[in-house]
Image (spheres, grey):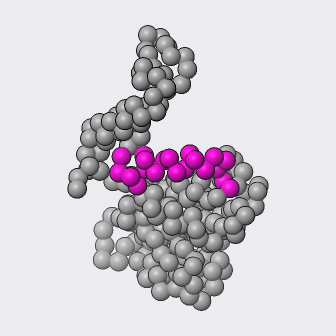
Amino acid sequence: MPGTIRLDYVSIFPEYFDVLNISLLGKAAEHGIVEVHSHDLRTWTHDRHRTVDDTPCGGGAGMVMKPDPWGEAFDELLGTEPDPDVHVVIPTPSGRPFRQQIAAGLSQAHRIVFCCGRYEGIDHRVIEYASRRWSVHELSLGDYVLNGGEVAALAITEAVVRLIPGVIGNPDSLTEESYSTGQEGLLEYPVYTRPVSWRGHQVPEVLMSGHHGRIAQWRHDRSVEITAERRPDLLEP
Ligand code: 6GU
């Protein structure tokens, strides 16, 4: 078995990460492949109201997460020594687009700390400070806005953990998938199972023909067709 990966989540809603104890990820944890720890950012506040936010310097709407609780969270979870093998993931709609290739890279890590911001974001000095010590990834799931980084951190976690050897039973389902992840640049073709006739809808005949070459050609054609319709950007040279 390859080494274990430790995942830490820092958030003002640490209960979001309770779901990691079920499903694929729960099994990975049971087998000792992953170790999950979630933390309440307010642990690292010292005032009566356990304040984690403040008004933005320069004015404007919303609130910004104060740097101090994050600094103390880093001190406790990571110390202050630089270590490029430690990965710090900061989900943010202004991050780089999260892709399968980034998931594959993170699946080789031994340590990932997810920093989940709320409000209008985290004081930028926190990102500067962490970037000087660890490998920081500001990542976005796509062009829409979530209220906080928690749901994004869960999505990123699932994409990463399923790539760790031993987490998915059937390794073929991972290699074939390169087809549909944007790695090979095409979306997945439609799939069918029995019965061949269902409520007046038929399984395409070619799939029942036993001609492997024709089946592969049909699937490729459908992939190109669906990609052209839904993600024409993936077909550009
Ligand atoms: Cl990573 N975070 C937030 N808050 N919103 C998002 C996102 C991330 N990706 C898309 N929208």
Q: Residue furthest top?
A: 200
Residue placed most toward the observer, 127 or 44? 127
The image shows residue 132 at horizontal and vertical percentages of: 47, 86
Residue shown at 68% from the left, 56% from the top: 166
The image shows residue 124 at horizontal and vertical percentages of: 41, 77
Tell me which segment is drawn in magenta. 166-186
| Quadrant the N terminus occupies | bottom right
Number of marks: 0
Residue shown at 51% from the left, 67% from the top: 105
Q: Residue furthest left?
A: 237
Q: Is residue 171 magenta?
A: yes
Residue placed most toward the observer, 108 or 125? 108
Quarter residue 35 falls in = bottom right
Q: Main secondary structure of the magenta part?
A: loop
Q: Is residue 15 left or right of residue 152?
A: right
| Quadrant the C terminus occupies | bottom left
Q: Is residue 70 left or right of residue 29?
A: left
| Observer able to see residue 21 | no
Does residue 21 sit above or below 226 in this rendering?
below
